[in-house]
Structure formats: C-alpha cells, structure tokens
Image (cartoon, grey):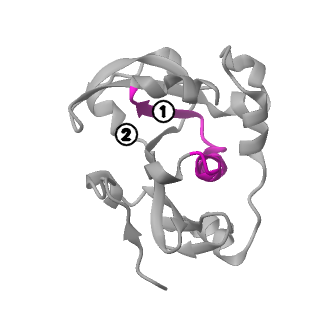
Amino acid sequence: MQKIKHAEGFRFPDEYDFRADTRQIVALKDGQAIGRVRILYNNLPIEKDFEIPNEFAKGNTKTEVSKFMIEKSNRGTGSYLGLLRFIYHHVRDCGDVYISNLPKLEKFYERMGFRKMGNFENTELDDNYSAMHIYIPHFTFNPEKLRQPKFSSLLRKLIMVPIPKNEIEDFYLQEKSNAIAIAHKTGAFGEY
C-alpha cells in the first residue's frame, strides 16, 4: 500500500485520534488525502467545552462526528456526500450524534436534520463554535420528528444509500479497525 500524503491545513493528529474507540474515515484522490472525518464514542471532545442539555441526550450511546474536512479545491465534488454516507453507515445504530462547527456551517448541517444546541468557545481552536445534535433513530425511521424546517429529504435519501459491500468494508465493519480510506470517485476502499 502506498503512503498517504496529507493535504495542507489538515490538523492531524490530536489526542482523540489515538483512542481505541476512535474511527477514522479518509477520502483519497490520486493517493493524497483530500478529506477526513472521525467518529468518537462517549467521553466526547465537545464535552470539554460544552455541557450537553438533557433534552439532547435521548439515547444510550453518545457519539461525536468531528474533524470533518474536505480540502478546499475538492469541495463541491461529491466528496462531502461520500463521507456523509460513510458517517451514517457507522452511526446508524447510535442514538445521539453531536457535532461542533463554525457558526457559518449551521445551515449546511440543518439540511441534514441537525438542531443547534448552543454556542461555545472551542478551547482547542480558540474560536466560537456551534454545538449541534441529531437523534439517529428519528433520521432513519421518523424524519418528521426531526423538527428541522431546513431539512432536506432528498439529502437524507442520498446519505442512506447502502455502500457497496466488499471484503475490506466487511472487515472494517466487523472488526472495527481504526481507519479506512475511500478513493475519491472510484468508491474503492483501502486500509489506512
């Protein structure tokens, strides 16, 4: 397997990247990482700076999706949708999913059904961030309960499209290995 080069500007890694329960998903194009996202379970980074209100803690499992980044020159190419599909297929059995993002991205996440919980000062990045939440059982089975007026049912359907099965994905889903890379456009998979 070839060594993966990281695009400029990716903050990688930090202390949460090395936790045993952290999952990494990386988008590749021509052998270079052009996007990434990580999924964490319980003891979440967002909880360092933001107290999650009880009304946004419905399920047993707390999950955070963070470090969702696409290299600037590859935005708008379908890379977001590809990573969103992978995220959904890894959190679909979870209850509460949280994200923190720059306030200018709130509308983007609202279209997926996320609701804003509040704002906080992100001590790691020294900037004001929004804290957002989605309850995955509502997204999957009862989208009308999301109560999000900007929600896009078409985007929901696109995100839920099954990912083609192959040996590497089966291994990843069964063994919960720490990282997977997806090749941009081709849909090919590889361990990272």
Kindly tell me whether residue 38 is visible in this rendering. Answer: no
Residue of label 1:
98
Marks 1 and 2, how far apart at CA: 9 Å
Left or right placement of residue 147 versus residue 75 in this view: right
Dot 1: within a 10 Å radius of its alpha carbon, few (fewer than 14), some, or many (20 or more) residues?
many
Q: Is residue 53 above or below residue 8?
A: above
Which amino acid, mark 1?
Tyr
Q: Residue at x 53, y 73 (%)?
A: 30
Q: Between residues 15 and 190, which one lies in front from this camera angle?
A: 190
Which residue is at a point 48% across and 33% down the rendered structure image? 98
Circle 2 SS class:
loop
* Vertical arrangement, residue 97 with respect to residue 93, above or below: above
- Closer to the camera, 138 or 12? 12
Residue 154, x across and y down, in percent? 78, 33
Amino acid type, callout 2: Leu
Residue 84 placement, left or right of 3? right
Please indicate, yes or no, whether residue 143 appears anywhere in the rendered image: yes
Q: Which residue is mark 2?
A: 44
Specify the segment rendered in magenta. 76-102
| Pick the front one: 178 or 104 | 104
Q: Earlier in the sequence, mark 1 or mark 2?
A: 2
Q: Is residue 155 magenta?
A: no
